[in-house]
Every structure is written in C-alpha cells, then in structure tokens.
Amino acid sequence: MCTGGCAKCLGSTLIPLAVLCTLANILLFFPGGKVVENNLHITDEVWYFGGILGSGVLMIFPALVFLGLKNNDCCGCCGNASCGKRFAMFSSIIFAAIGVLGAGYCFVLSAVALNRGPKCYTGTQWTYPFQDGNYLANHTLWSACQSPENIVPWNLTLFSLLLVMSGIQVVLCGIQVVNGLFGTICGDCKCCGCCGGDGTV
C-alpha cells in the first residue's frame, strides 16, 4: 500500500477512536450513570481529561492530517515531482508524535485510575478504599463502596476502554511515524507521473 493510502486508513480509524474516548471520559463525570451533587465526589483522574484532551482533541489533528495526505499535491515544490508529498509525509511524523503523546497521556491516566480505584462513599467518608489494584481480582471488596451505586464496575469498564483505545491510538500513530519516514525518503507511489513526471522518486 502506498504511504498516502496507509495514512488515510490510519486517520479514518483514529477519528472514531477519538470520539469514543471523548464519550467515555464524559460518562465518567456521571458516576454509576447518575449526576453527583458534589463535584469533589468524582474520581480525580477524570478531571485530568485524558479521554477528552489526550485521546480526543489532540488525536483529531493528526487524524485529519493523515486523511489529507492521500489527496495532497505531490508536485509540491520547485517542479520536483513528489517533493510536496515528501514534505507532507515528513510533517505527518510530527503530528503522529503529538498523537503518541496525547494517547500516551490518556493511557497512563487510565492505568493509574484503574490501579487506584474509584472515589466512593464507604459509610463514613468519601475516599479511595482500594489500594494497588487489589479490587481488580477480588470482587468482594467492591462492597466497600456504598455510593454511588455500581461505581466500581462503571469506572472499571470506562477506564479499561480508555486504556485499550488509547493503547491502539499509540500503536496507530507509531505506525504512521514509520510510514511517514518511508514516505519522506521514498516518496509515494501515487505521485508517479503527476505533472508529467517520469515516475522517478
């Protein structure tokens, strides 16, 4: 597959992942699917907006750049066929790196949140009753959270989704870094013959 086509494929995959990560982060503001009376009762990691900023907003820019590479003018500069395409592929490496940072931010936050567990009411106070992810393998500990209802499976499911999706985003952006290097060095096969060139890259 040509480097431009590969980038377009990656971009079209990143956009729905970014939307899903944003939705997952928004849902985390409603512990157990309910509106809380006090924002201090929401798990701290939710307020760092890992899914909204890291895997959401910061991922949209690389995705749009990747999608645009397929149709980018490959005649580009100084009449040199594929020069413009090569420069575009080089710039995509920078945006891919931004995507890796954003998704990595979300991945780390999600891992920390899963290990720490949700903030909940234990009967005496709002706190984090779990330590070092001990609740992940021992469901009997979940009863320590009396409120909000179903807060443990709610947070566990959504942060797990964020962890998986942000991990996929990191891999996809990493692939584009490699793809962008090939495109920068070798050009794109779709550039052959444009502007009357002989196809040499």
Image: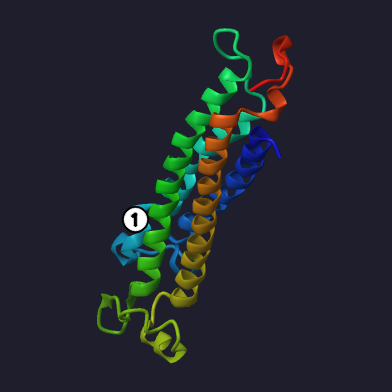
Q: Residue at x 62, y 34 (%)?
A: 67
Residue that lies at the very extreme toward the top in this rendered image: 78
Q: Residue at x 60, y 40 (%)?
A: 11
Determine which quarter of the picture holds residue 36: bottom left
Residue that lies at the very extreme toward the bottom in this rendered image: 140
Q: Residues within 10 Å of mark 1 (few under 14, many from 20)?
A: few
For badge 1, the amino acid type reads: Trp
Q: Can you give x and y, in whole percent of width and height, for residue 3 in the image?
A: 64, 35
Q: Residue at x 73, y 10 (%)?
A: 196
Q: In terms of depth relative to the viewer, which is nearer, 20 or 175?
A: 175
Residue at which label 1 appears: 47
Q: What colouring does the structure picture have? A: rainbow
Q: Residue at x 46, y 88 (%)?
A: 139
Residue 49 vs 86, above or below: the answer is below
Q: Can you give x and y, in whole percent of width and height, for residue 134 in the image?
A: 37, 84
Q: Quadrant of the C terminus?
A: top right
Residue 149 shows up from this direction: no
Q: Is residue 83 left or right of residue 93?
A: right
Q: Can you give x and y, in whole percent of width and height, for residue 21 in the image?
A: 51, 54
Residue 39 vs 71, above or below: the answer is below
Secondary element at tag 1: helix
Q: Is residue 22 left or right of residue 81?
A: left
Q: Can you give x and y, in whole percent of width and height, for residue 124 in the image?
A: 25, 83
Q: In terms of depth relative to the viewer, which is nearer, 183 or 151?
A: 183
Residue 20 vs 59, above or below: the answer is below
Residue 164 vs 99, above or below: the answer is below
